Image (cartoon, grey):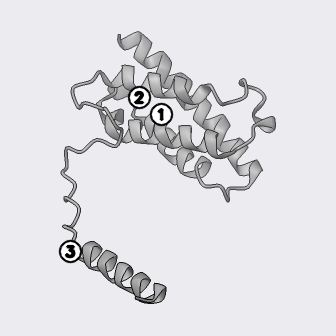
Amino acid sequence: MAPSRLLALAALGLLTACASAPPPPKAASTDMYVTGADAADDPCRRVVSALGFAEHVLKPAGQEEAQEFGEGMRGRIAYVEGVILSYGEKLPAGLAEHTATMKRTIRVLVPAATPHEKAVAALKEWRAAATAIEKGCAQAG
C-alpha cells in the first residue's frame, strides 16, 4: 500500500476517534479556579500565600518602572486572580474594596499587550491592595 494511502487511513482513524470523544463535563458552581484548592481552606491563608508567590518575581516596591512584564510574572499574577476568584468573597468584609482593586488591576497586568506605563500604574495599585489584604488578614487572624 502506498505511503499516502496509509497516511490517509491513519488520519481518518484519528478523526473518527476524536469525533466520538465524549464532551467535557460541565463546570459546577462549586468548582475552584485553583488546582488543589478546597472550599474549606482558610481564605486569608490562601490569598496571602498567592500574593507571596507572585511577589517572588516582582521588583521591590518603588522599582515598578523597572519591572519586566514577562510570561512568568503575568502567569503568577493570573494565579493570584484564580485564588481571588476562589476565596476573595470569603475574606473579611473590610477587604472587599481591595479585592475589587485586585481583580481590576489583574485584568490590566495579565495581557501581554498592555502598554508598560499602564502596567506600571496597575502594579502600583495592585501592590497597595495586596498590602491592605495582607494587613487585614493579619489583624483578622
Quarter placement of the C terminus: top left
Compared with residue 22, is residue 76 higher up or lower down, i.e. above or below?
above
Picture coordinates of residue 15, whole percent (x, y):
32, 79
CA distance for labels 2 and 3? 48 Å
Q: In which quarter of the image is residue 113?
A: bottom right
Label 1: which residue?
98
Q: Residues within 10 Å of mark 2 (few under 14, many from 20)?
A: many
- Element type at marker 3? loop
Query: Which numbered disc flags the more N-terminal residue, 2 or 3?
Result: 3
Label 3: which residue?
20
Q: Which of marks 3 and 1 is in front?
A: 3
**In the image as oriented, which residue stretches furthest toward the right?**
66
- Element type at marker 2? helix
Q: How crowded is mark 1: few (under 14 residues within 10 Å), some or many (20 or more)?
A: many
Q: Quadrant of residue 76?
A: top right
Compared with residue 103, is residue 59 higher up or lower down, i.e. above or below?
above
CA distance for labels 2 and 1? 5 Å
Per the rendering, the mark at residue 57 is: none
Residue for point 23% across, 32% down: 39
The type of residue carrying mark 3 is Ser
Label 2: which residue?
95
Quarter placement of the N terminus: bottom left
Q: How crowded is mark 3: few (under 14 residues within 10 Å), some or many (20 or more)?
A: few
Report whether 34 appears left or right of 73: left
